[in-house]
Amino acid sequence: MSVADRVEIGVLTVSGVVLGLLTVFYLDLYIGAVPVPVTAIVAAVGTALLCRLAGAITESTWRYAPLIAWTAVVIVAAVPGLNGNGALIGDWRVLLLLVCGLGAPAAMTYAARLNNL
């Protein structure tokens, strides 16, 4: 892997962190009194796109670096702080965010591996 490829993987990993922050902070979005977890869809599309772009650069396990960065941000946000509150609430939207954010790249990787058989 060349230096330019490593820089690109680094940029994609930082993009995964930014995507994680945005999806966590806007998960508690309401329209009126109805919760609208639109960031779960953004997480699904974003993590799948980041993994696809990283997979085009390298075939090693570094292609999962943006997904690992996104997952780390979401897990850290879910852990309560010293005073007992965290950035994420214990709600169905957090589970939806995790399922969409991790499920879309997993399904995409599985489908790509089936096509290579």
Image (spheres, grey):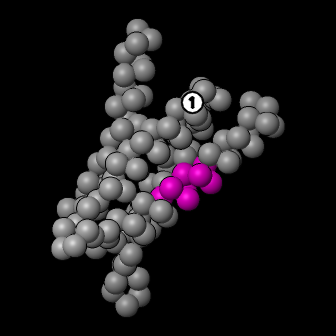
- Point out the image quarter for the C terminus: top left
Residue with the most extreme front position:
32
Residue 24 position, x and y percent, is: 41, 65
Q: Is residue 13 above or below residue 74?
A: above
Q: Is residue 29 above or below residue 39?
A: below
Q: Is residue 22 above or below residue 47?
A: below
How many numbered circles are shown?
A: 1
Q: Is residue 60 above or below residue 69?
A: above
Q: Which residue is rendered at x = 26% and y = 54% of the image?
A: 96
Residue 65 position, x and y percent, is: 56, 45
Left or right, 30 with reference to 23: left
Amino acid carrying mark 1 in the image: Gly
Residue 17 highlighted magenta (yes or no): yes
**Residue 43 visible here:** yes
Among the 4 quarters of the image, the one containing residue 5: top right
The residue pinned by badge 1 equals 55
Observer-nearest residue: 106 or 28?
A: 28
Observer-nearest residue: 29 or 57?
A: 29
Q: Which residue is rendered at x = 70% and y = 40% of the image?
A: 8
| SS at badge 1 | helix
**Residue 72 visible here:** no
Magenta residues span 13-20
Pointer 1 local density, CA inside 10 Å: few below 14, some 14–19, many at least 20: some
Residue with the most extreme right position:
3
Among the 4 quarters of the image, the one containing residue 58: top right
Residue 18 highlighted magenta (yes or no): yes
Q: Which residue is rendered at x = 18% and y = 73% of the image?
A: 33
Q: Which residue is rendered at x = 32% and y = 56% of the image?
A: 38
- Point out the image quarter for the N terminus: top right
